Image (cartoon, rainbow, N blue to C red):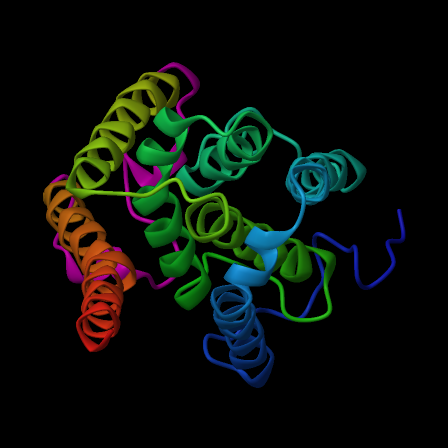
Amino acid sequence: MAYPPWLDPYDAEPFILFSSSHIVAISLISALMILMFLLRHRLRSWSERTRRTLRIVLACMMFGCEIALQLWYVYGGVWSLKTALPLELCSLSLLLSALLLLTRSRWLHSALLFAGIAGALMAILTPNLGYAYAHFRFVQFFVAHACIILALLYMTWVEQLRPGWRSVVSSMIFVNVAALFVYVVDVMLDANYMFLRHKPNTASVLDMLGPYPMYILGEEVLALVLFSLLYVLLFAIPDRLNHRVKKGKSSAV
C-alpha cells in the first residue's frame, strides 16, 4: 500500500534531536505558555459561559489528538496492544487533563498538575519520536504535549485552582499508582509502556539514571525534584512576589 509521505509509518525522515524543526516547536510552545501567563487576567475576566466553551474546545482538541493517533496506527497497519494503548504517562495525562477541563475537579488538578507538566516538558525536550516535520506523528506529538501543559496552566492561572505542596505529593502518588497499574498490563501483554521493563531504544534522560531496574528509582528522585522545582518556580515565588507587591501598595496608601 502506498502512503502519502506525511502519513507513511515506514519510510519517513527520522526525527533529529534539537534540529531546526524541534527548536521551532519548543519555541512555539514556550511562547504559548508565556502568552497564557500574560493574558491570564483577561481570560479570567471572560464570562463563565465563554470560559466553559474554551475549556470544551481545548478538551475536544485533546481527545481528538488521541483519536487521530489511534486512527493513524490502524491506517498504517501498526496498531498493536503492545504499543498503541494510551498507557504512557503523557497519554494518561492528555486524557485526564481533558477530563479536568470538563469537570474542574480539584482532585484531578492536584494529581495531574506537576506530573503532567513535568512529563510533557521532558517529552518535548527529549522526544521518543521517529518522525521529523512535517509528518503527522511529529505534529500530533507536539500538539498533544503542548495541550497537556496549556490545559493544566489554564486551570491554575485562569480557573484559579491553586496548587500547594500537597499537589507535589498528589502528583507523586498519581505517578506511582499509574505505574503500578501499567506495570501489571506490561507483564500481561509483554509490553513496555512507561518504560517500566526496559529503556527506550532511542537516547533519553533515562540513559543518565543507570541500568534497569535502578533507573526506575532514579526516575522517582528526578520526578520529586522536578515537581518541587516546578512548584517553586511557577507558583511559590510568583505568589510571594505578588504578595509583596500588594503589601507595598497597601502600605503606601
Q: Which residues are magenta?
A: 188-213
Which quadrant holds residue 80?
A: top right
Figure check: 191 above or below 226: above
Residue drawn at the location 46% of the way across and 63% of the way down:
124
| 198 magenta-colored | yes
Which of 93 and 67 lies nearest the eye of the viewer? Answer: 93
Q: Between 181 and 152, which is closer to the camera in this rendering?
A: 152
Count up the numbered dots.
Answer: 0
Magenta span dominant secondary structure: loop
Res 141 quadrant in image: bottom right
- Along the line of sight, the residue nearer the viewer: 34 or 78: 34
Across and down, in percent, residue 215 comes to 15, 47
Q: Is residue 4 left or right of residue 67?
A: right
Image spot of residue 245 (x, y percent)? 24, 72
Quadrant in the picture for the C terminus: bottom left
User: Which residue occupies 31% across, 46% down?
Assistant: 114
In the image, what residue occupies the spot 53% across and 47% down?
A: 151
Residue 51 x/y as whole percent: 65, 43
